[in-house]
Amino acid sequence: MGYPHLSHGRETPVISKYFGDAEARTLAGWQARGGYEVLRQALATDPVDVQNVVKDSGLRGRGGAGFPTGVKWSFMKPDGKTHYLCINADESEPGTFKDREIMRWTPHQLVEGAAVAAHAIYAETAYIYIRGEYTEPIARVREAVREAYAAGILGANAMGSGKRVDVHVHKGAGAYICGEETALMNSLEGRRGNPRIKPPFPAVAGLFAQPTTINNVETVCAAIHVLRNGADWYKSLSSPSNPKSTGTKLFSVCGNVARPGNYEVGMGFSMKEFLWDVCGGPPPGRSFKAIIPGGSSVPILTPEECEGAVMDYEGIQAAGSLLGSGGVICFDDTQDMVRQIARLARFYAHESCAQCTQCREGTAWTTKILERIRDGQGTMKDLDTLLEIADNMTGKTICVLSDSCATPVVSGLKKFRHEFEAKIPKNRSSVMVPSFTTAAA
Amino acid sequence: MTAPVAPANPGMVTLTIEGRIVVVPPGTNLIEAAKTAGVLIPHYCYHPSLPVAGVCRMCLVEVEKFPKLTPACATSVGEGQVVHVHSDKAREARKGVLEFLLINHPLDCPICDQAGECELQDYTFAEGRKDSRYMEPKRFNPMEDFGGDVLYVPNRCILCTRCVRFMDVMAKDPVLNVSERGDRAYIGKFEGRDLTHAWAGNVVDLCPVGALLSKDFLNRARAWELDRAASVCPSCSQGCNVMLETRDNVVVRIRPRPNAAVNQHFACDVGRMNYRWINRRDRLEYPVARTANALTPASWSEAVQQAAAAIGGATHVTVLASPSLSNETLFLLSRIAVHVGASSVMTMERGDEVPLPGVPDLSLRAERVANHTGAALFGSTESDAPLASLAAGDVLIVADAAASVTTIPDGVRVVVIGTVLHESLLPHVVAALPVCNFAEEDGTFTNLRGRVQRFLQAKAAPAQARPSYRVVGELATALGAGSFPPLAADVFAVMAATFPAFTGMTYRTLGLQGAPLPLLVEASA
Ligand SMILES: Cc1cc2nc3c(=O)[nH]c(=O)nc-3n(C[C@H](O)[C@H](O)[C@H](O)COP(=O)(O)O)c2cc1C
Ligand code: SF4
Ligand code: SF4
Ligand code: SF4
Ligand code: FES
């Protein structure tokens, strides 16, 4: 369902089927809905077979990068080492709130998904790393884990399989960067949440230097349904136009839109129908000015670019952006794009972990220039400077947070340049430098 | 996937860097590989003695067939790679990093101790922008006392984390951290902790900019005013390779000189701080000899003759020599001792042993003398009461060991070969011969592991003082113990011919990195 709104008839609710159904939250309720049967079967199945079904389904990571999940799992070999699974529930990307609803309404779905994925990668231990601000989801998942242990679903003899599956819930402390997979591992280890340089990749040396797989909440939940109904069923849920995008995807829709919320549709869904039909289009009397289709880190699209697009990895890329995490942010005609982009940049400047020079300095500098333009103190030269800074910030750092800050600036300047220019006083060649301020800790 | 390339040099990796063929062992990173071809890949956070962090992104280079620029510090060499350090793309990337590093930098080189030896300054001059596009207010954080000898100037900090990594990994004393995020980040100090570890001063050298400063050296000199001489730290028997830095003939700073076999890139704070004595002004500046009842200035030959006469007429001779004298001087003293049948004794100052855990066998040693290994080789034995057996009619030769002499029995005559003339000796002295301290002459020390290392003259000697090996050589000749050459290198050659322990060694073979005693090499082979 498109909680808090009623489900739309054109949705394909698989993961979100029990959103709004309070009974699904309890162990009894979840089991009454067929819960943990997939886990029981998986525990009796060779991990390689589990990996292969997921590989065949074409399921790709829902955390943003879209890496094929079965392939990722197949990097984990039975090598006698301790393996770990990390579930990424840090969900801090502006505009993304799908994992939140999964955890609020179906915490056992996540626990089951985590246990299945752990088995698939030869791990006995899974950590669920939940964004610290998610107080209700944390409570729900903790309760579900408690119930699952009490029922013998987790623990030394999970579901009587003789296999050990432990699930730990870890509460983050409020840093967006801890959603980056290697920063998350550092954070779990009790270190500063800085992304690590790769190689080594997590599958070789991840959490506590052991082979580790990291998956998004939605990814492992989708995997349960793949295993229950088969790879072909999963593929049948999506439009065959882009065969590398399969199954369903949860989109979080927010901003200036008639019906914000989470909507689950088959991959390949028409973006036009999604925005105007499923989500009800812009608020009454307004029109869309811009759409960010995949969380704040992806290029901004114009409504025209959205109209012909289909919602899957390749389709949104063809339209000039990325599917990302599936956070759809809508801006209507009353919005000031300079202000909006400056706000996004400020977020990245605040959240940069500060390791890489380009990111630490570039995000902050970009923000200062954008805010100066916003306040009517910009020059035309600033626009070129912004693009050059963005170029220097792209493709050069340890993780892509730096690129993510540059992305909306570049696409915003390309598509809404007139809004920037309109804020720049005519004939201004130099600016008043604000008085010297201190930015001490 | 590209097909694997057959290695051109089995067991090694062959690649091209800036058009030059480089052959290095597998696993070498691109910065080190480039060094072997004489190519400097600009970098900040990378340091050969620290774990790779890959954070400054200054070392980005273009490798053909790689989709993006790659950090050279964190990229291992690959067979057949073609690396471009000075391509347009790589230069642009570095220019971008330099601009980012400078936007919040105070540009206060004129008052910064690092100026002249600052990597931010150097690379900016080499390939930075000539103008600034930054029009916003700069970040400001106040200077902080990090304890020990270290001051932190956050406004100059480029957050390379070398200091943090040194304290965490090398000193295993995690005092420093990166605090805050984004452009608010700075190097923080854990509550109640200070940089008091005996090796903490290294963070000042490691800092590529003027963000970590030595309080001791603060505002002492501009880098370009300094003269530098390769030397060996005399403050303990580890024998860290150091650079003595002088300004106008005064040693103002001691800094480590890299030597992978001894101290990597490090020196301890005891060694760094222990230089004021080198500059002492209350020196013995001219030879003195006893005429009638008074000590009066004498010519070199008079003083040497008088010393020789006293030694020749003694009932028994004791040589009390500092174990921080050079091998050359101790060797010549041993010639005298053998010739006159003297006993050779030494005393040793001791302190706590403080290892640098991140480097094997590197420690501030308990024996706070430079050359006890050499002294022992030349027959000197350690004694708590070196003068206990002195009796009237004896002669005591005190070679730069005045401080350890307490009371001398009546009737004992003393020959001083030293940098200072200790007051308690005055009534007994027959002749005093002024010598150079180790910074004023050439020589070698043998460290506790038997590594023989050269030190070079760093400053001029005061007045008539002469190199100690020369003075002792003349005295030996006057006693008829043989004739010895006047230059340190030649004395060393005679020593190597005389003492099997040193066989085959010459100043040339030692170079500036030293070498283990040949006997030790054989024993361990
Ligand atoms: C700055 C940054 C923040 C990220 N935040 C999240 C996040 O909150 N949740 C998430 O699932 N993935 C996040 N990712 C992506 C993860 O690094 C990783 O790709 C993902 O968790 C892998 O899981 P998947 O294969 O199931 O998608 C982030 C990446 C970056 C660079
Ligand atoms: S790009 Fe930014 S957030 Fe990512 S590692 Fe570098 S400094 Fe940290
Ligand atoms: S103080 Fe110096 S060494 Fe430490 S992080 Fe800053 S620039 Fe690097
Ligand atoms: S460890 Fe010894 S030799 Fe090395 S710097 Fe310290 S005092 Fe000098
Ligand atoms: S030297 Fe390579 S990233 Fe800093």
Image (tube, rainbow, N blue to C red):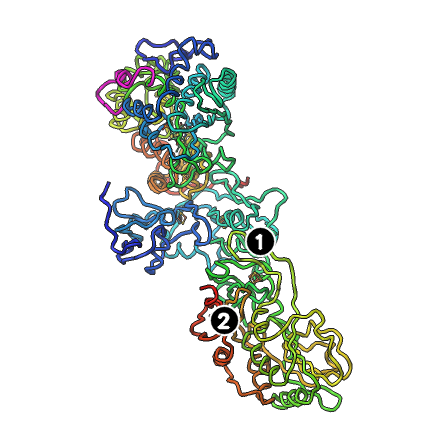
Q: Is residue B340 part of the magenta span, yes or no?
A: no
Q: Quadrant of residue B122?
A: bottom left
Residue B256 can be seen in this image? yes
Q: Marks 2/1: CA distance?
A: 30 Å
- Horizontal side of B440 relative to B524 (left or right) equals right
Would you name the residue on which mark 2 appears? B454
Q: Secondary structure at mark 1?
A: strand
- Pinpoint residue B308: horizontal percent, then vertical percent: 64, 88
Q: Amino acid at mark 2?
A: Arg
* Residue A274 position in % (x across, y down): 30, 16
Q: Is residue A239 magenta?
A: yes
Judge left or right: residue B156 versus residue A68.
Answer: right
Image height check: is B383 above or below B46?
below
Other residues around mark 1 within 10 Å, as few (<14) / some (14–19) / many (≥20): many
For the point 70% across and 76% down, the residue is B422
* Residue A255 relative to residue B231: left or right: left
Residue at screen point 30% across, 19% down: A247
Instruction: Tell me if residue B322 comes above or below residue B126 in the rendering.
Output: below
Discs 2 and 1 lie in a common subunit: yes
Closer to us: mark 2 or mark 1? Answer: 2
Chain letter for mark 2 = B
Tell me the crowding category of disc 2: few under 14, some 14 to 19, or many 20 or more residues within 10 angstroms, Cα based. Answer: many
Q: Is A389 in front, or is B426?
A: B426
Residue B370, by quadrant, is: bottom right
Residue in the foreground of this view, choosing between A364 and B74: B74
Q: Which mark is residue B150?
A: 1
Q: For the magenta stretch, what is the residue range?
A: A227-245
Disc ID at residue B79: none
Residue B320 screen position, x and y as percent: 66, 76
The kind of residue on which mark 1 rests is Val
Could you tell me how many numbered marks the image carries?
2
